[in-house]
Image: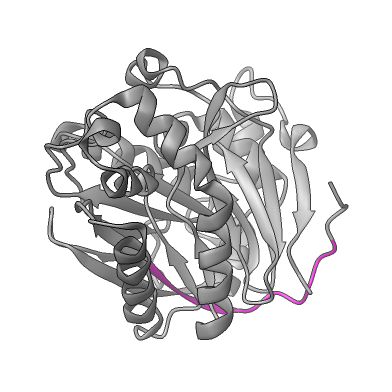
Amino acid sequence: MTAAARPARPDVVRIAAAQYPIGEPASLDAWQDKIAQWVADGAATGASLLVFPEYAAIEQAAAFGTAVSSDLAATLAAVAGEAARRVTLHQELAERHGVHILVGSGPVRTGDGRYVNAAQLVTPGGLVGEQEKIIMTPFERDWGISPGGPIRVFETGLGSIAVAICYDSEFPLLVRAMAEAGAEIVLVPSCTERVSGFHRVATGAKARALENTIVTVQSPTVGDAPWSPAVDRNSGKAAIYVPSEHGVSDDGVIAEGVLDRPMWVAGTVDLDRLRRLRTSGEMRNYADWSAQPGAVALGGRIERQSLVG
C-alpha cells in the first residue's frame, strides 16, 4: 500500500448515487451494456463521482443461467470469477466519461479461499482502490461471506473518500476512524430487502454525517429479482447527507430519490463549507467528539492510499 499524497482539494463536488434496479441480464454482454448506459446517464447529471450499490454485481449471476443463478454457492463463485473484468469495465467507463466510480460491490475470493464483499473505487486515470466490508450481517454469515479489512481512506482528485458498505455505516467508531484519517466523503452502498432495512442504513448514514461533519452518500439496490437467492427483494432510495446546519442544509439532506424507483440522485456539496463548520458551526460535533466519556482516537488504524495520477 502506498503512502497517500494529499492533492489540492476541490471546494465543491457534484455526486450522483444510483437507485440501481437488479435485473436479469441474459448475457454478460447485456449486463455490460446496462452498466455502460447507467454510467453515461450518471455522467450526464454533471457529477464527477458516481456511486453504485452493495451487491449490484450479483446481477451478473443471471447471465450464467438458472443452474448458477438459483444456487447461492454457484452464484458467489461465478460472480467472484468476474471481479477483475468488472473492474476493468468500470475503469474504461471512468476514463471515457471523466468520472470517478464506486463499482457495485460483490463477492471477491481471497487467497485462502474465503469470500469477502468488496467495492472498488476507480478513477478517470485508471487507478483502483478497494474496500472490503468489515462487519457481516446475519445473512452474510449464512451465505459464507467473511469479514474483510483493513479500513482505507483514498486520496483522490475529488478529496478524501472512504467507503462504509451498508451495515458498516451503522457503527459510529468505524466511520469515525475514517473521518479521523481525513475522509470528507463516505460512500454507503447498500442492499436491503425491506423498507425497515433501508431506514436503518439511512439513519446510520445521516448520523455519521452529523457526528463527523462530512458528506455521506447512500446508493441502494431496488426492485425484485425472484431468480436470485441473494438479492431477491430490494428496497431503498438514494440520498446525499450532510450535517443539519444553517447555510448548508436545514434537514441534512442535499438530495434524495423516490423510494424503489430506478434513478440517479445527484447533488452538489460544498466541501469547503463543511471543513469550516468543524470549528465555526452552530454545533461542532467533530471537534467535540473527545468530550464523550470513553471516546478514543482511531484514525491511526486506517490505511491511506493515493488514487491521484
Residue 171's spot in the image, x, y percent?
A: 48, 28
Q: Toward the viewer: 232 or 81?
A: 81
Q: Name the spot of residue 3 as percent of width and height, x first.
A: 88, 52
Left or right, residue 141 beside residue 293: left
Q: Is residue 220 magenta?
A: no
Residue at the image position 77 percent from the left and 32 percent from the top: 301
Say if residue 152 shows up in the picture.
yes
**The magenta stretch spans residue 7:** yes
Q: How many marks?
A: 0
Quadrant in which the C terminus appears: bottom right
Is 61 situated above or below 23? above
Identify which residue, 92 or 10, lies in the foreground: 92
**Vertical side of 49 occupied by 199: above or below:** above
Please name whichever residue, 251 or 44, is drawn nearer the observer in this view of the structure: 44
Would you place residue 95 above or below residue 289 in this image?
below
Q: Classify residue 177 by image quadrant.
A: top right
What residue lies at 14% left-to-right and 49% top-to-bottom? 223
> x, y percentage for residue 291?
63, 30
Region of the chain picked out in magenta, as a range: 5-16
Is residue 167 visible to the viewer in this orientation of the structure?
A: no
Q: Is residue 227 left or right of residue 122?
A: left
Residue 235, image x, y percentages: 17, 44
